[in-house]
Image (tube, rainbow, N blue to C red):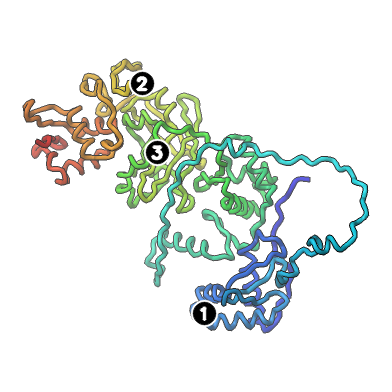
Amino acid sequence: MAETTQLSTLPEIEFLGSEEEQRLAQRVFALLRATARFYPLNAPIRVPLAVLAEHFSTVDPAVSSAEWEERLQKAIAANAHVFALETEEGKVLVATTRAGKPPLPPEALIDTAHQLPRRFMEPPPEAVAPVRRPPVAEPVPAVSEQEHPPVEEVEVVEQPRLQVVEDISVLSDEELAAAIRATLGSTPEVVGFGDLWAPAELVPRLSRGDVRRIREYIVERGEPLTDAELLEVVLGVRPTAPDFALQQLALDARLASEDDFEFVGVPGGHAWTVREVNPVPAPKRRPADIGQDYRFLLEELQGITPGSEAVVDHVLTFYEHYHGVLPYNALLASVLPPRVYPSQTRALLRFEAPQTHETFYVELRYPTANRGGFLFGFERFFAANLVAGALITIERSEQPGHFIIDYLPISRQERRLLALDEKQRKYIFKPTTYFCAVQDSMLLTEQRFPRFAGQEPLDERTRRSYERVLEITFERVGENVGTAESPRYMATLDDLVAGVNVERPLSADKIRQLLTSGEFPQFEADPDVADLYYFTPHR
């Protein structure tokens, strides 16, 4: 018989004492039981009395913690058939079980029937003829631990600190929602995930068998699956069921507590995957290093609203085309989905390309405290259809997590464009045929930037220095208006943006800021011509 998910409800318990003591005892029991909803029925549940008193004083500040301790002791004493007071290392503990009875003393849990003294003193039992039973097949995991790919370094996302606000009318809608979410998240009697919340005693429980079958189904499909599909296909819960939202919450909250599952969904489309199921190929460069390359974007993300736009346009740089990535900048973030919860680090999105009749997964890495956000998984699509400088359009569809990527087709074009010879580790210009519209200022042709030929990519240490990358780019794309002995390079902002983004990503605004900040005296702006700059090497 297939396993089913049962609705978890409180057992019928008669609380004693005054009306106030009965209500308080009932609240305490619900609180303790909610913190241990996955415990065995008769397993002890212990919580320090002081912790309970502090919790109730937080809920009702009009009563101090000391007064709450007195009220709790009276209510517990009146309900000795449900609770027990224990002392451990000088602390008073309130103990009960999910069955609504005081836990048994430790000596009652000792199995004396199988201790050696009793076994040797009693005569051996009569031999009983064995009864052959049909073998039971043990479940075999879909992928062994040895087959798991190495786990990438995970960065801990810094959680925002809670602030006490006396007047909530001063908060914005976003701040108020965050405050409510934080308060509910710290309340043991409430279970929540994303924007779904419910009292803990109403949330169904998933069995280990349910979790195992969900995992096997994800591995079988080989792609992330939504909670709605998992409920319908694996657990047999139809979307028309009256408690479907509650079942979604139960599934999401349970999988979130399992180490083997990872949430990769978006608002309105909660999706889950497991460790060995990742449909997005790894990029040429380590994701952690790409995040460091895009760290400068953290400055421009202040005040943006993810998902506020339906369509955006973007021009591909050489770095983006070569690595198959896109930046999580203010423009693209406006069309991409926000996090479902503050600590979410990544999401898997589906991109559809109508012109090539293909659909593929893309991974969105959200920004962290010291790494910029980006998307990767476009490498094959970019290489087959586009060139650096191509104009692309990204449109958000009505289906959560689904996007359309488009470009403007043109007649056949042939140019000698910049490329990287990966065997020789040198830049070269090679004949390239393309059929997509481009922005000429970002097109890296041999006629425009001949000095790139034969140059080696910068080493990692040099790439991380904005100053050195700008200096080398001036020498590669600029015009020497000085002398051979005392060079002075001149370059437009368009040429610098195209050249710098061969080695590392930097926006035009960031490059302009670096050149005009005064922090680097070797750079100067032309006083008469906009976006024309000079570089004088140190002597």
Residue 383 as seen in the image, left or right of residue 140: left
Instruction: Estimate how packed mark 1 is, as few (under 14), some (14 to 19) or many (20 or more) residues with alpha carbons within 10 Å.
Output: many
Give the image quarter of residue 131: top right
Q: CA distance from mark 1 to mark 2?
A: 71 Å
* CA separation in Å, label 3 and label 1: 55 Å
Q: Is residue 415 above or below residue 313?
A: above
Q: Amino acid at mark 1?
A: Ser
| For discs 3 and 2, the disc positioned in front in the rendered view | 2
Q: Position of residue 51 (x, y in %)?
A: 54, 73
Q: Residue at x 32, y 29 (%)?
A: 318
For the point 91% across and 56% down, which residue is it? Answer: 125
Numbered badge on residue 311 = 3
Q: Which residue is mark 1?
A: 65
Residue 100 is at least partly visible in this image: no
Q: Position of residue 102 (x, y in %)?
A: 71, 72
Question: As rendered, which of 279 and 420 lies closer to the eye?
Answer: 420
Relative side of 536 to 26, left or right: left
Crowding at dot 2, Cα within 10 Å, few <14 / some 14-19 / many 20+, comes out as few
Eyeballing the image, is 92 above or below 458?
A: below
